[in-house]
Amino acid sequence: MTKLWEKDYQLDQQMERFTVGDDYLLDRKLIRADVLGSIAHAKMLSTIEILTAEELAKLKKCLLEILSQAEKGEFQIRPQDEDVHTAVENALTKRLGELGKKIHTGRSRNDQVLVDIRIYTRERLLVVQEKVLALAKTLLNFADQNRDVPMPGRTHTQRAMPSSVGLWAAAFTESLLDDLELLKTAYFLNNQSPLGSAASYGVGLPIDRQLVSDLLGFDRVQNNVLYANNSRGKMEAVVVFALSQVTEDLAKLSGDLILFSIPEFGYFTLPKEYCPGSSIMPQKQNPGPLELVRARSARVLSRLFQLITTIRSLPSGYNRDFQETKGPLMEALETTEASVEVVDRIFQNLGVNRDALSKSFTPELFAADRALRLVAEEGLPFRDAYRKVASELGQLKAEDPRQNILSKRHLGAPGNLGLEKAKARIESETERVRREQERLQQVWERLLGL
């Protein structure tokens, strides 16, 4: 197979294996993006008369055949191809002869891989946003159904003050919605077209970068051609940072569920069909999926550090180091998506043990509330009320925990969760994601002539 950089020598085989790495495997996920980018690039080349209308039609027909093969799993990228770009161009050249060699005019593998990753990431980010919103909705419904179910609030892991299952679940709903803002920012930064930057310094042809950007449905062109290449790895790190905030929330939520579902607590019952057993202990039903969600959050975080340390202090322009930014990005996207799905399914089937929750309330949980009542009813300074209650802990009596939490009516308190605001936000954001997915589908249909 002909390499795009091939000249008058062959690369040492050991060096070739080392430099190719697993790129040819990762690039199987980029075939569709590469074909779409190539069709848009070919259309642009026809507008500046590098390609005739007839040549464009032939190239597009062949690219669509490659796309069809890829969708059936029949288009292969082999180690000797090095990457998807070489595999596609070689396929075009094999089928169309000299015409196939024209497709690369005005672009480099550098900006070609950039645009492929931007297209891939854009679509995967929308899926992640969609699933995060689905989980947020599940948690919101769970919070609503259990808004008045008392649950001890904890600090330092110790029982602290009366709280509710609703407050606990709604806290994660709101946290995920904050994470969504980071995902939206990552999407915005990713949604700019680098194509036409070539090897970082542009080309001596009157290429139309805006046209290509429009054809591919990008929000805008990434203007500076050197920055377009310098931003590789940076954009991936921005995306993975946003993903890491989601997975860190999932890790905390999973940790809570693991703890609160053990027999000593018994607050929740995990669905047994989601709990693998033990090879030696017949009674075991283990929270394995939640433990792996917790562990894999570290994997996403480590990929962020991998990206940041890979690109740190690199000289301007393309460097082969950038090759090592593709895998961490893809892995982080896939890990986050899978983790969100697992937690969503568990919450849809999670049992709430009201009796166990109610029985966990002991008199000292009401100490802070007692001190505050002394302030309100007897006019004591809070510090004096605090010391008075501290001296009488053994005399405190348990209160009705449900009445306690419902009495706290200020904004965001257990008795006033403000779920309506989160519900409206989830609905609005879900519609935004749906519209953007529909827009991109229309972009591809126009580009492919469907």
Image: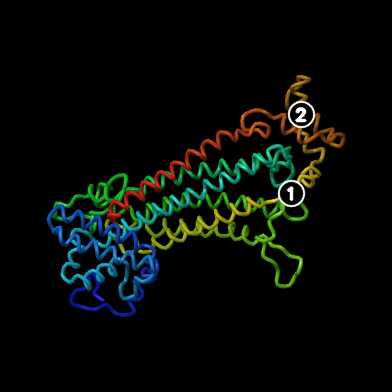
Q: Give the residue pinned by disc 1.
A: 267
Q: Quadrant of the N terminus?
A: bottom left
Quadrant of image for the C terminus: bottom left
Q: Along the horizontal axis of the image, is 342 left or right of 151?
A: left
Residue positioned most to the front = 450
Q: CA distance from mark 2 to mark 1?
A: 28 Å
Q: Amino acid at mark 2?
A: Ala
User: Residue 8: x and y, percent?
Assistant: 18, 77
Dot label at residue 428? none
Q: What residue lies at 65% left-to-right and 33% top-to-bottom?
A: 413
Which SS class for mark 2?
A: helix
Colour scheme of this structure image?
A: rainbow
Q: Is residue 95 above or below residue 179?
A: below
Name the front one of labels 2 and 1. Answer: 1
Looking at this view, is 2 or 274 the one in front?
Answer: 274
Q: Name the residue carrying label 2.
A: 371
Q: Which residue is rendered at x = 69% and y = 62% of the image? A: 286
Q: Nearer the viewer, residue 127 or 104?
A: 127
Looking at the image, the residue that sits furthest to the bottom is 13
Count residues near mark 2 (Cα–Cα under 10 Å), then give few for <14, some for 14-19, many for 20+. Answer: many
Q: How many marks?
A: 2
User: Which badge, 2 or 1, comes first in the chain's sequence?
Assistant: 1
How far across and how far down the image is residue 361, in percent? 79, 41
Residue 347 at x, y percent in the picture: 63, 50
SS label for mark 1: loop
Q: Amino acid at mark 1?
A: Tyr
Percent position of residue 292, x then y:
59, 61
